[in-house]
Image (cartoon, rainbow, N blue to C red):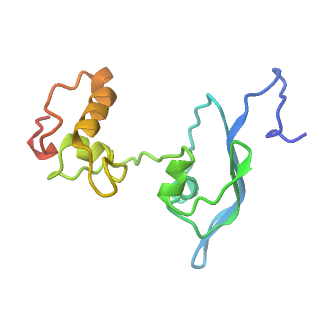
Amino acid sequence: MSPLDGAGANGPEREVILEMSRITKRFGSTQVLTEVDFALRKGEIHALMGENGAGKSTLMKIAAGLIDDFRGEIAVDGHPIQLNSPRAATGAGIAMIHQELSLVPELAVDENIFLGQEKRGGLFLVDRRRQIEATRAVLAPLDFQARIDQPVSRLKS
């Protein structure tokens, strides 16, 4: 039985929700990842640690659909999946929060939060009212006091 299969020394394990198997990636002549296995079980938190250039970011970018030219397999909830775009990864419940947060100063708080995932009221129209309500729900635990319909460039630190 492999460590990814289920029962461990402390009893039954939680279900594997993300499994990356034999992930291999090369950038030109530089081998970045070689047959890497990674599994995430429901309720777990992981810290990927290593030196610069060890492949941590590359592995996470593959999981987030930002890099699609790699070898290996990915399964979500036990089902093989092609994560060939960030939209595909988001649809599978995978999102990556980047270390360097970049905001668009001209856009409002709610527009930055939902950038690329806008709350649509029609095929092309953004439902700003629904998006602002969703933003309020996201920010409620943070006691955010500024107006969320104003550009982030107007926020004071």
Residue at x-position 26% and y-position 53%? 125
Position in image of residue 39 (x %, y %) = 69, 43
* Placement of the N terminus among the 4 image quadrants: top right
Residue found at the very far bottom of the displayed protein = 29
Q: Residue at x 53, y 58 (%)?
A: 65
Name which quarter of the figure residue 2 lies in.
top right
Q: Nearer the viewer, residue 104 or 137?
A: 137
Quarter of the image where one finds residue 123? bottom left
- Looking at the image, residue 13 sits to the left or right of residue 102; the answer is right
- Residue 92 in the image: above or below residue 10: below
Where in the figure is residue 20, as x and y percent of width and height?
69, 52
85 or 54, which is in the foreground? 85
Whether 57 is drawn above or below 152: the answer is below
x then y, percent, for residue 55: 57, 57
> Does 89 appear above or below 129?
below
Residue at the spot 14% in from the left edge and 34% down from the top edge:
157
| Residue at the right extreme of this rendering | 1
107 lies left or right of 49: left
Q: Is residue 28 above or below residue 121?
A: below
Instruction: Give the side of residue 105 with respect to residue 66, left or right.
Output: left
User: Which of these two is toward me, 107 or 61?
Assistant: 107
Q: How many marks?
A: 0
| Residue 131: percent from left, percent from top | 28, 39
Residue in view at x 61 percent, y 28 percent: 43
